Image (tube, helix red, strand yellow):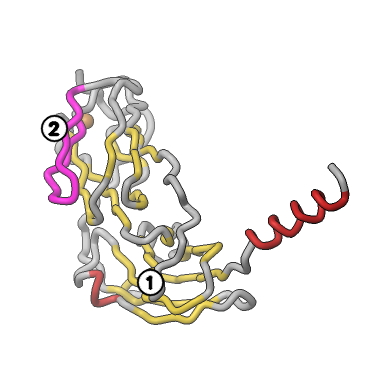
Amino acid sequence: MNKLAAALTLACICAMSAPAAQLRVSVKDQHGRPVADAVVLATPDEPKNALHAKPPPDTVDQVDKQFVPYVKPVFVGSRVRFPNSDHIRHQVYSFSPAKKFELPLYAGTDAPPIVFDKPGVVILGCNIHDWMIGYIYVSDTPFFAKTELEGSASIDDLPPGEYSVRIWHPSMEKAEETTLQRVTLTADVPASLEWRVNLKPGVRVPRVSGAGSPGYP
Ligand SMILES: [Cu+2]
């Protein structure tokens, strides 16, 4: 490569890497306890040229007769596979308006991927194991994250600007629209937002994982 070509290449790379902002969030419940599995959604006022040309393929596994992860946020248009890591068969379905589907009884990785092409909450169930419940949150914005066990999450590589940010959790008492917060994101300093949300008690009964759980044919 001659010097001019090298200089041009460098200029292109620099132009492409625009400064990005970071948003850190913390979610707690009415008792001040950290809330895991909350989806955080940041929507810019000005539509941004989303860098996510094609969403990466995602998976929701089935392990020990539970959906793993319990909550899975994906960008609208994403393909999701539902591998079955159990030694029994599952029949995954959803009746949710955002995506109605049913995967006939299957084992292993036999099931074809499902495309989630409409924003909204998709509640997953299994026709064989009534207690199995999981959620796919189909996001209308490419800028989202999910809180970890300590109730925190971070959305990186955001174009600077004005944003509306909301959260969603399967046990939240109020609609996600009530959680809206405004924030201005700049490239130099990470921004932080906090939420305190009321969760309905005792919605989820996690099953003990590991040996001893009986199998079904
Ligand atoms: Cu099942």
Side of 55 relative to 114 (left or right): right
Observer-side mark, 1 or 2, equals 2
The answer to whether the residue bearing label 2 lies less than 8 angstroms from the nearest atom of ligand 1 is yes
What secondary structure is marked by label 2?
loop
Kindly indicate the quadrant of the structure image that contains residue 63.
top left
Residue closer to the observer: 29 or 145: 145
Query: Which residue is found at the position 36% from the left and 61% from the top?
Result: 141
Mark 1 or 2, nearer chain start: 1
Query: Which residue is found at the position 41% from the left and 73% from the top?
Result: 46
Kindly indicate the quadrant of the structure image that contains residue 209.
top left
Depicted 167 relative to depicted 120: above or below: below
Depicted 128 relative to depicted 173: above or below: above
Whether residue 30 is visible = no
Query: Which residue is found at the position 25% from the left and 55% from the top?
Result: 119
Q: Quadrant of ligand 1?
A: top left
Q: Name the residue carrying label 1.
A: 28
Quick check: is 71 in the magenta stretch? Answer: no
The part of the chain drawn in magenta is 92-105
Depicted 18 relative to depicted 182: above or below: above
Q: Residue furthest right?
A: 3
The amino acid at mark 1 is: Lys
Q: Residues within 10 Å of mark 2 (few under 14, many from 20)?
A: some
Residue closer to the observer: 65 or 26: 26
Kindly indicate the quadrant of the structure image that contains residue 109.
top left
Residue closer to the observer: 34 or 46: 46
Question: Looking at the picture, how far across and down is residue 87, in whole percent?
Answer: 32, 20
Q: Name the residue carrying label 2.
A: 127
Side of 6 relative to 204 (left or right): right
Q: Residues within 10 Å of mark 1 (few under 14, many from 20)?
A: many
Quadrant where the C terminus sits is top left
